[in-house]
Image (cartoon, grey):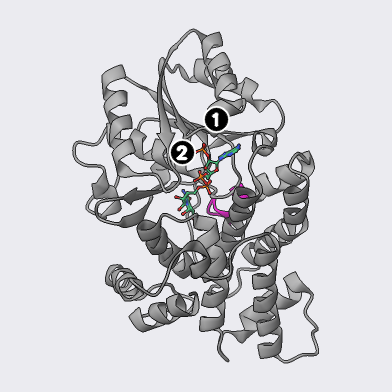
């Protein structure tokens, strides 16, 4: 295990009715002007927005609003949020929604106190040194953004979707009430679960030895996803199932699983490029890419790790050879994603061979080698994309 620094400053309020903590948080931290950020419709259609406003009204402070954040949030709406923050003297940016809303909120908060174009953060021309505080009320279990320091934003004109990672972006508080996720439809529920599992894979498939704690945590989270995914798909309002998926999503990407080891992130690098161009759902894209990435990087050298995965997650027959166990585990992964209604190829999402070479070139251009478990070059990336069609 390598040395690491682990920072997790977010206060989490988890469970039914935890929205009641919002007014206390606002009063105790002395916020005066809140910007509430929401997505296209769900927060207002269901109860999250109303509950948030009722909490803010209890405190007697002012609030402003920015709604209409789309999945794969655009930099243009972030700029709009920054203008509101400066105009209304905002001192708390509160995201009420899924990963897209919360990522936009974090970027707005950092951009509002940055003396330049906040796209610089994504182009790696600057790192945020300060930010307005952010808080969130999560309504979809998937990204882990509720407690991590990441934000992923799309620049539509440049067809780029890039990530910013900085601990300073971690929200000061996160309200996680599984009841808010009862209204998430089957597709977005499944896409969220695939995303959670993909976050685990990106950290589990690592070459750093002796990270047993991290490995067992990974396997625990995968087992929980496999146990509860079919339940939440069938019974949207099953509280315990939604609660376990929600907490799994937070723990999968709050830094714990990747602490002390070099992590991969190839599947994410490839998927982000696809959704930058085709605006597809992140989880649906991963459901295609992840199993194809697994197959591409499987070799004599890596079979052992895949065999751990096969034995500990899919109860693979231990008498079989390592490659047999590895291939079995990859097949089961694909079948599992399909069983949740997730796609198995890009054509199902309207994507054909046009543009694949350009995408591979762009990804390779940004990374000397993509990933670390098995570093990928442009040809590898293109091969995975072509297999994914
Ligand atoms: O826009 P609204 O109307 O809110 O509808 C959303 C959206 O259509 C809907 N939804 C959310 N909560 C709901 C609900 N519908 C009914 N009831 C509710 N309670 O779900 C749809 C998808 O929402 P979105 O926020 O886009 O999904 P998700 O949470 O999966 O976020 C995806 C974004 O996060 C990025 C992805 O790339 C993508 O842009 N990621 C962010 C990460 C991070 N910050 O750490 C890591 C991830 O790997 C990922 O890249
Ligand atoms: Zn992801």
Which of the two labelled residues, at mark 2 and mark 1, occupies the earlier sequence position?
1
Residue 163 is left or right of residue 233, and the answer is left
Viewer-nearest residue: 310 or 276: 276
Residue at 46%, 43% (x, y): give it: 100
Front position among marks 2 and 1: 1
- The x, y position of residue 42, in whole percent, is 55, 33
Q: Is mark 2 within 8 Å of ligand 1?
A: yes
Q: Position of residue 85 (x, y in %)?
A: 31, 25
| Dot 1 beta carbon under 8 Å from ligand 1 | yes
Residue 253 is a magenta residue: yes
Is residue 215 highlighted in magenta? no
Q: Position of residue 334 (x, y in %)?
A: 64, 72
The CA distance from mark 2 to mark 1 is 10 Å
In the image, residue 23 lies at what x, y percent?
56, 17
Q: Exactly how many numbered labels are in the figure?
A: 2
Query: Does residue 142 appear left or right of residue 76 in this picture?
Result: right
Q: Which residues are magenta?
A: 249-257
Which residue was labeled with disc 1?
A: 43
Q: Which mark is residue 101?
A: 2
Nearer the observer, 17 or 308 = 17
Dot 2 and dot 1 residues touching (CB under 8 Å): yes
> Which of these two is toward me, 229 or 211?
229
Q: Is residue 140 above or below residue 4?
A: above
Asked if residue 130 shows in the view, the reply is no
Q: Is residue 366 visible?
A: yes
Residue at x-position 78% and y-position 42%: 240
Check disc 1 and report its element: helix, strand or loop. Answer: helix
């Amino acid at each position: 295990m390598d040395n690491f620094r682990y920072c997790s400053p977010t206060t989490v309020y988890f469970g039914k009715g935890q929205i009641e903590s919002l007014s206390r948080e606002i009063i105790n931290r002395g916020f005066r002007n809140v910007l509430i950020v929401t997505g296209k419709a769900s927060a207002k259609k269901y109860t999250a927005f109303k509950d948030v406003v009722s909490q803010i009204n209890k405190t007697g402070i002012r609030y402003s609003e920015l709604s209409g954040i789309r999945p794969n949030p655009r930099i243009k709406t972030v700029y709009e949020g920054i203008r509101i923050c400066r105009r209304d003297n905002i001192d708390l940016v509160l995201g009420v929604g899924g990963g897209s809303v919360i990522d936009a909120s974090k970027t707005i908060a950092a951009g509002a106190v940055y003396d330049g174009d906040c796209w610089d953060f994504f182009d790696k021309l600057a790192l945020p040194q300060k930010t307005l505080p952010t808080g969130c009320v999560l309504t979809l279990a998937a990204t882990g953004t509720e407690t991590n320091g990441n934000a992923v934003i799309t620049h539509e004109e440049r067809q780029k979707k890039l990530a910013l990672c900085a601990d300073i972006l971690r929200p000061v508080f996160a309200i996680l009430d599984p009841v808010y996720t009862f209204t998430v439809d089957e597709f977005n529920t499944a896409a969220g679960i695939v995303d959670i599992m993909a976050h685990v894979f990106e950290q589990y498939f690592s070459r750093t030895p002796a990270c047993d704690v991290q490995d067992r945590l990974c396997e625990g989270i995968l087992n929980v996803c496999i146990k509860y995914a079919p339940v939440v798909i069938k019974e949207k309002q099953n509280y315990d199932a939604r609660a376990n998926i929600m907490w799994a999503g937070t723990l999968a990407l709050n830094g714990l699983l990747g602490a002390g080891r070099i992590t991969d992130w190839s599947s994410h690098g490839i998927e982000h490029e696809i959704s930058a161009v085709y605006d597809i759902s992140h989880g649906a894209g991963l459901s295609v890419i992840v199993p194809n990435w697994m197959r591409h990087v499987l070799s004599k050298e890596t079979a052992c790790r895949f065999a751990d995965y096969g034995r500990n997650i899919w109860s693979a027959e231990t008498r079989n050879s390592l490659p047999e166990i590895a291939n079995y585990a990859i097949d089961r992964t694909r079948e599992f994603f399909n069983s949740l209604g997730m796609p198995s190829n890009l054509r199902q999402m309207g994507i054909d061979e046009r543009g694949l070479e350009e995408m591979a070139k762009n990804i390779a251009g940004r990374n000397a080698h993509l990933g670390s478990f098995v570093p990928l070059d442009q040809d590898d990336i293109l091969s995975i994309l072509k297999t994914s069609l």
